[in-house]
Image: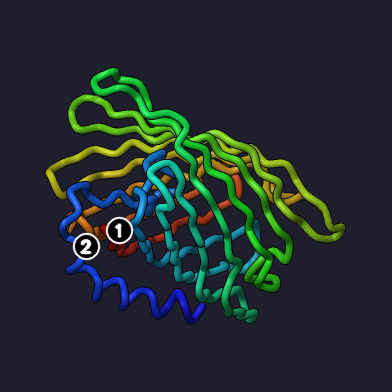
């Protein structure tokens, strides 16, 4: 947790050395759908943010959560990217029960499967693999590991539009009794370049249940992303659960910075 916290100001200090990069930064946040694009060999990208949400289930007290988010992405080659995703600290309030602490860490990789020929109109394809390490105790964390494989697609469209789509499966660790629940994941995120710097994001994210007594979930996210420089981007958005498990409403925002050659 301390390492990730220190990386935030360090990344900002190193920003000036990274402005020479020709390709604009393309964060994997604030939506939940992952792009098929990689950061590129020899580059690091730090994506940070917060998520504040409220939810009520039945007649239970309103549950409030504030979570700090951080993801470090490293381009090993132009076809392989490794990542460390964490929630450095989080707070949970529900009635008189309050909890706080660091949450689980997730190790991931993104491998480029297909790069379309120029002007072909075909999508870019990649495969994301991940494992979540149960480093946090309940109720901040689940206390069990998760595993997943997700196929990623990014497709450029006319009029400044771009579509990211994901489809995959995961094994979600559960307790009482210990075991795993298979989960399906399907999502799509449509972005529109309003200007050279400002983009809108609209997303639908569907998952089957993540707990034995839970329901399938369909989340909707709307967000704005502003590219301050080629290596620095800001985002802000809102999220809600249209069906099943998820927040009644959530507000999220963040900062992403890239450094390297």
Residue at screen point 26% across, 57% down = 261
How much space separates mark 2 and mark 1, taking CA atoms? 24 Å
For residue 207, what is the image quadrant? top right
First in residue order: circle 2 vs circle 1: 2
Q: Position of residue 101 (x, y in %)?
A: 58, 79
Residue picked out by circle 2: 18
Q: Secondary structure at mark 1?
A: strand
Checking the image for residue 228, the label placed there is none
Q: Is residue 145 above or below residue 127?
A: below
For residue 164, what is the image quadrant? top left
Q: Position of residue 96 (x, y in %)?
A: 63, 81
Q: Position of residue 24 (x, y in %)?
A: 22, 49
Q: Is residue 16 above or below residue 245?
A: below
Looking at the image, the residue that sits furthest to the left is 195
Residue at screen point 76% across, 56% down = 174
Disc 1 residue crowd, few under 14, some 14–19, many 20+, Cα 10 Å: some
Residue picked out by circle 1: 236
Q: Position of residue 153 (x, y in %)?
A: 43, 32
Residue at screen point 19% across, 40% down = 193
């Amino acid at each position: 947790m301390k390492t990730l916290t220190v990386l935030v100001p360090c990344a900002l200090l190193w920003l000036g050395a990274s402005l020479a990069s020709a390709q604009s930064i393309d964060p994997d946040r604030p939506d939940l759908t992952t792009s098929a694009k990689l950061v590129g060999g020899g580059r690091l990208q730090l994506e940070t943010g917060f998520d504040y949400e409220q939810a009520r289930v039945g007649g239970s007290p309103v549950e409030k959560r504030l979570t700090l988010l951080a993801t470090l992405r490293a381009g090993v080659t132009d076809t392989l990217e490794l990542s460390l995703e964490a929630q450095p600290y989080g707070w949970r309030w529900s009635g008189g029960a309050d909890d706080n602490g660091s949450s689980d860490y997730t190790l991931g990789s993104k491998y480029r499967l297909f790069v379309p020929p120029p002007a072909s109109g075909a999508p870019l394809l990649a495969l994301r693999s991940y494992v979540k390490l149960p480093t946090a105790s309940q109720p901040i964390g689940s206390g069990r590991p998760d595993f997943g494989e997700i196929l990623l697609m990014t497709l450029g469209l006319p009029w400044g539009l771009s579509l990211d789509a994901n489809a995959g499966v995961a094994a979600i660790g559960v307790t009482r009794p210990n075991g795993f629940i298979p989960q399906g994941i399907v999502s799509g995120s449509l972005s529109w370049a309003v200007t050279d710097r400002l983009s809108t994001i609209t997303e639908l994210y569907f998952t089957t249940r993540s707990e034995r007594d839970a329901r399938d979930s369909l989340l909707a996210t709307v967000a704005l992303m502003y590219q301050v420089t080629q290596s620095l981007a800001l985002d802000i958005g809102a999220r809600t659960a249209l069906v099943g498990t998820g927040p009644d409403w959530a507000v999220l925002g963040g900062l992403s910075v890239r450094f390297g050659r």
